[in-house]
Amino acid sequence: MILAVTAMVRDEIDLIDAWVEHHRAQGVDVIIVTDNASEDGTREALQAHADAGHLVLLHDPVHRKQQGTVVTQMARDAAVLHGADWVVNADADEFLVPVDRTLTLKDVFTRLDPAIRSFTVPVVNLIGPLAESGAGFDRLVWRDDRSPEDLAAAGLLAHPTHNAVHIGSADVVVAQGNHIVTIESKGSPPPGLELEVLHLPWRSWRQVERKVAMAGAGYQANPDLNPSPNHHGMRDFLRLKEGTLLPYAAARHVDADAAVRSGLIEDTFLRDELYGLGLSSGTEESPLDGRLAMVASDAGRALVSRDRAFERRDREAEASEHELRRAVEALEVRLRQVEGELSAQKARRVVRLVDAVSERTRRGRKRSG
C-alpha cells in the first residue's frame, strides 16, 4: 500500500519542516509539494527536503488562487507516477493524524478497504494565545470545540469544513479547498480507524496578516473566482485594508484560563511528536505584549458584537422590505382584480345601453310605420 500526501504552499517557513517530518514519521510514502513562489525561505527549506529524498518538489509562480487545478494535477501524479493507493490533499497548516494515537497513518491506510473509494475527515482547529510571530506548537494546544454561540462571539461563522481523502486515480478532480473530490464515497473508515486533521490556521499575527493579504490579492487576480464579500477570507481582506484585522484576529484566540472556562480539551500531540523527533516547536516565538493582546481581543469582540448588531438590523430591514414588497404586490393584484371587475361592469352597462337604444329605435320605427 502506497500512501501519498500533496500540498500547495506559499510562505510557510514557520512550520514547513515540522509538516514534512510529521508526515514522514506517520509513514507517508510519497510527499508531493508545489511551492507557490515563496519568498520567506520556504522554497529553500523544501529544496533541502527534496535533495534529501524526502519529497517531490514542484513550482508554480502564479498567484491567482489556482489551488484546485494545481492540487488536482498533484493528486493525479501521485497515482500515475508514484502508484499511490490512497491520496491525502492537505495544506501546510494541516496535520492528518489517526484518532487512535497509538496508530500511524500508515497503519490506518494499510487496513482501510479501498472499496470505500473516498471519505471526508473532520478538521479541528488548534487555538491558544496570540503571538506576534512563531508557529505556536507550544501555545496552540486547545481543541476548538466551542459552541456555535461562542464561535459567533469570536467572529467565526462555523467550524472548518471536512477534508476529502480518496483512492489513487488518474482522473480525479479536487475542488478548491480540498473539501470535495469527484470520486464517489462508498463508506467511511470503520471504528478504530478514524482520522482527523489538526489545523493551525491562526499561528501568529504576522502569519495571519501575510496570509490574508496573499489570499485577497489572489482572489482579485483571478477573474474565474467570485467569492462572496461574506467569504471569511474576503471579509478579513477588507478588514486588513481598513486596518482593523488585528483585533478581529485576537478575538479568535483564547488563553489557558479562557480555554479551561470554556471546557476546551488540551491536545499536545503535535508538540510532543516534534520533540520526540528531535525538532523544535517551529521558528522562534515572539510573544505579543500581554496588555496589547488583551486590549486587541476586547476590541475585536466589541467589533464582532457591533457587526452582529448591524447584520441583525440589515436582516430585519430586509425582512421588512420583503413584507412591504409582498403587501404592495398583493395590492397590485387586488387593483388588477378591481379594474377587471370595473371593466366588466362597464362592459355590461354599455351592452345594456346599446340594447336600450336599439329597443327604442325599433319602437320608433314601428310608430313611424
Image (cartoon, grey):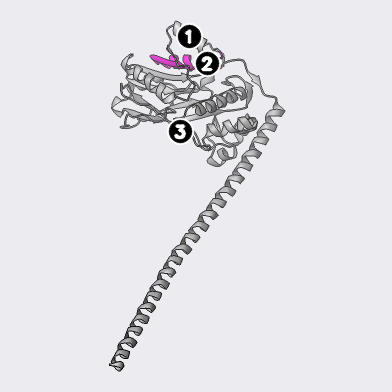
Residue 140 seen from this side: no
Measuring 58% from the left and 21% from the top, which residue is drawn there? 136
Residue 329 seen from this side: yes
| Marks 2,3: beta carbons within 8 A | no
Over which residues does the magenta segment extend?
11-40
**Drawn side of residue 364 relative to residue 139, left or right:** left
Q: Secondary structure at mark 2?
A: loop
> The C terminus lies in which quarter of the figure?
bottom left
Q: Which residue is mark 3?
A: 161
Nearest to viewer (mark 1 / mark 3) = 1
Nearest to viewer (mark 1 / mark 2) = 2
Which of the two residues, 200 or 170, is positioned nearer the viewer here? 170
Nearest to viewer (mark 2 / mark 3) = 2
Which comes before the other along the chain, label 2 or label 3? 2
Residue 23 location, quadrant:
top left
Q: Which residue is mark 1?
A: 47
Which of the two residues, 103 or 185, is positioned nearer the viewer here? 185
Which amino acid type is shown beneath numbered disc 2?
Answer: Ser
**Drawn side of residue 356 relative to residue 243, left or right:** left
Q: Is residue 79 magenta?
A: no
Q: Is residue 14 magenta?
A: yes
Which comes before the other along the chain, label 1 or label 2? 2
Crowding around mark 3 (Cα neighbors within 10 Å: few <14, some 14 to 19, many 20+) is: some
**Relative to 336, does residue 272 appear above or below in the rendering?**
above
Crowding around mark 2 (Cα neighbors within 10 Å: few <14, some 14 to 19, many 20+) is: some
Which amino acid type is shown beneath numbered disc 3?
Answer: Thr
Which of the two residues, 4 or 80, is positioned nearer the viewer here? 80
Measuring 35% from the left and 31% from the top, which residue is drawn there? 188
Q: Which residue is mark 2?
A: 38
